Amino acid sequence: MSAGHELHLKWLGIDTYQEAVIYMRRDCEVCRSEGFEAQSRVRVTRNGVEIVATLNVVDSSILAPHQAGLSSAAWHQLDGHEGETIRVQPMPPLESLVALRSKIYGNRLTELQMQSIINDVAKGRYPNIYLAAFVAACAGGRLDVEETVALTRAMVNAGQRLDWGRAPIADKHCVGGLPGNRTTPIVVAIATAAGLIMPKTSSRAITSPAGTADTMETLAPVDLDLPAVRRVVEREGGCIVWGGAVNLSPADDVLIRVERPMDLDSEGQLVASVLSKKVAAGSSHVLIDIPVGHTAKVRSPQAAALLKTLLDHVGRSLGLTTRIVLTDGSQPVGRGVGPALEARDLLAILKNEPTAPGDLRERALMLAGALLEFCGTAADGTGIAHARQLLDSGRAWTKFVAIANAQGGLRQPPVAPYTHPICAGSSGQVSAIDNRLISRAAKLAGAPSAPAAGLDLHVMIGSMVEPGMPMFTVHAETPGELEYALGYLETHPEIVTINTP
């Protein structure tokens, strides 16, 4: 490669989330000699490490002609240092784009085509515009069953895979759509206290105000690498970590990057996302919770039945044993909606505090009991009682503390400095709570990126209210985010429906 392709790194401190971006002067030798334009895809190399980045062109003096900047994500991928030399080359055409265009026009993808696309996604070769095109082309029921199997298998093959050398290896997942439904850490604590092996890898939030990884991160480190995960599981029998840090199904985390701003989590991609992570984590038995409700992600029993069939079929195709549980999704669960507020609730349950939310406690016990029976740790019909004994006795709390400490240390979740109650305007009985509007309000308050932000619920369906009585409280980390959420709530009074006498 000619010296004209060499540039010196300058730190710019630009956060593009997870997208690799390189910044170069329009008049630099590399851009002129290669004919690079804004949005060109280029290969960037430093000391033998190569990444693919999207070019953003600079016309100001922020960079000299011999310098290049990198987004924070690209900088960390290359382990960059100020002043070091990098080399830049054109990116050859991607063969998988032929398959992507075919899918955009409504054609089926073969297993080889799906693998080609996912390999390029996992290797960072797709810019956000290609990722968005793929996500949109597969949404709205445009993936058939075999394409979903192919997508799931491709996502597993694109990353690392754990093998624990024993069975059963338990896992539990909720498809989401229900604010505050943070049962997983409680289930992990109970299951591992019962002697099950449960290496739980979780995603961050996609369309919700908090994912399990977001909530757990307010209590303990979750960005563990594979050796650390193995150490924690071998020591304590389980873990609760972020799947993106361990390179299990890495393409899924890249796709989530564009699904989140699109607020899109389609059925086929949901199944592939969930099950690829389970296979990659070495799980053998997976319990899946599908909340069903008018404002949940899965809105009807018919839709739940179709999703159950798809999960079962794809799971069998990849060697998983699955058990699907349909649960009530008519209203939020627990009180907190947002990472720290949900962490507060699950701590109260694990510590057997009298003020702990009973609905979240009972749901977690039901799911933990089903998992104990499913994996053969409890006899049929005794799972809930066994789970309750482990929780009531404090053994589940002891195990949770041990897991958190093994992951780097248990800590207290943060508390938001700004709060504002939303009060009832009339007397009556609460007849409905809109899950989607609750989630939207919590996100506008800053969750999950602001971990202390969200909503604290004070009523449930059936609660009696009087004028001026707080129905929920908005929590925010900044005054601006608080005002943003309150402005949204003023225009959406239907978030809580009250039947007046």
Image (spheres, rainbow, N blue to C red):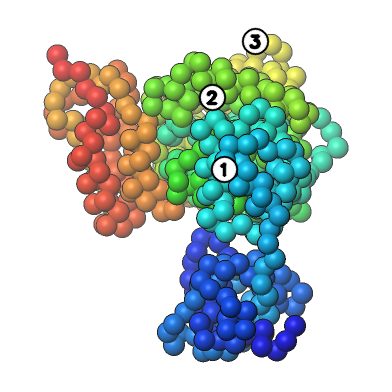
In this rendering, would 461 be left or right of 92? left
Among numbered discs 1 and 2, the one appearing first in the sequence: 1
Q: Are marks 1 and 3 in contact (CB under 8 Å)?
A: no
Q: Residues within 10 Å of mark 3 (few under 14, many from 20)?
A: few
Q: For residue 389, what is the image quadrant?
A: top right
In this rendering, would 140 be left or right of 442? right
Between 482 and 255, the one nearer to me in the picture? 255
Among numbered discs 1 and 3, the one appearing first in the sequence: 1
Residue at x 58% of width, y 23% of height? 307
What x and y, as percent, mark residue 468? 15, 32
In front: label 2 or label 3: 2
Q: Is residue 314 above or below residue 208?
A: above
Q: Give the CA separation, mark 1 to mark 3.
A: 48 Å
Q: Which residue is mark 3?
A: 381
Between 152 and 35, the one nearer to me in the picture? 35
Q: Which residue is mark 2?
A: 290
In this rendering, would 407 be left or right of 316? left
